Amino acid sequence: MIIEKYDQNGLLLNVNFIDKASTDGVVGFRGRVAIVEGEVADAQGRRKPPAVVLEHGVMLEKDGKLALVSGSLDDLADLPTFVEKYKDDFAPGMMAIIYVVNISKPMQVELEGINFALIPMQEGIPWNELNDEAGLEKSEMKKLSSGDKVFRVWKELGGYKPKGGKVSLDAALGQIDAGLKRVERGAI
């Protein structure tokens, strides 16, 4: 299983869960995903924390390929690096919804044959937004296992129509707004 391989290779951080769904060949994941690994810190090969991560990552593995990838990037310029690192595991037609801090309007970019829906988000949690995009209520998910929740979101997103027009990667990168920053809220 590729998600378990990522975990064994230290690419998954702050793992909320890696859970098999009740459907054969389906595994769900939520947590952080390393995009640029940290430098080797010592002679034992231990690494420093990753330099770049996909925050609040959500992945669904189906039959040995990634059928869904979502999460939040601080910088749209990191998307090509993510794609390069994980593209061999993309299923044809993979659903990819990426929330991006430093863009101000939704758009779509095709990379490696996959349409990436890019949605601006400086504040919030991608998992909650995905549930909204799928039209799911919290009560509908309550009794499902963690893996089945991710699978249900993926199934409900089957007819998803991304907002924003299709643009080239260069055009998308040209719309980066360096003034936009992630808003973090803590306990009050």
Image: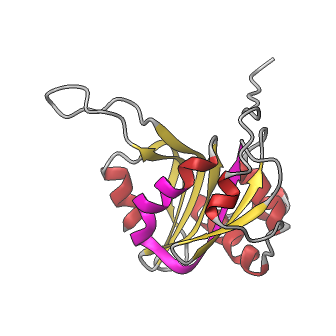
Which range of residues does the magenta coloring cover? 80-101
Front position in the image: 137 or 160: 160
Q: Is residue 85 above or below residue 101?
A: below
Q: Quadrant of the N terminus?
A: bottom left
Q: Is residue 89 found inside the magenta-colored segment of the image?
A: yes
Q: Quadrant of the C terminus?
A: top right
Residue at left 40%, top 58%?
85
Judged from this view, the residue extending furthest toward the top is: 188
Say whether residue 131 is visible: yes
Residue at left 60%, top 58%?
146
Total count of labels: 0
Judged from this view, the residue extending furthest toward the left is: 43
Q: Is residue 29 above or below residue 183?
A: below
Say whether residue 145 is visible: no
**Coloration of the structure image:** secondary structure
Q: Is residue 35 found inside the magenta-colored segment of the image?
A: no
Front position in the image: 13 or 85: 85
Place of residue 23 in the rendered image (x, y in percent of width and height, measured from the top left): 54, 78
Front position in the image: 102 or 174: 174
Place of residue 130 in the rendered image (x, y in percent of width and height, measured from the top left): 75, 59
Residue at left 82%, top 47%?
104
Residue at left 65%, top 48%?
72
Q: Is residue 108 above or below residue 32?
A: below
Q: Quadrant of residue 6?
A: bottom left
Place of residue 168 in the rendered image (x, y in percent of width and height, measured from the top left): 66, 67
Front position in the image: 168 or 153: 168
Place of residue 178 in the rendered image (x, y in percent of width and height, measured from the top left): 71, 35
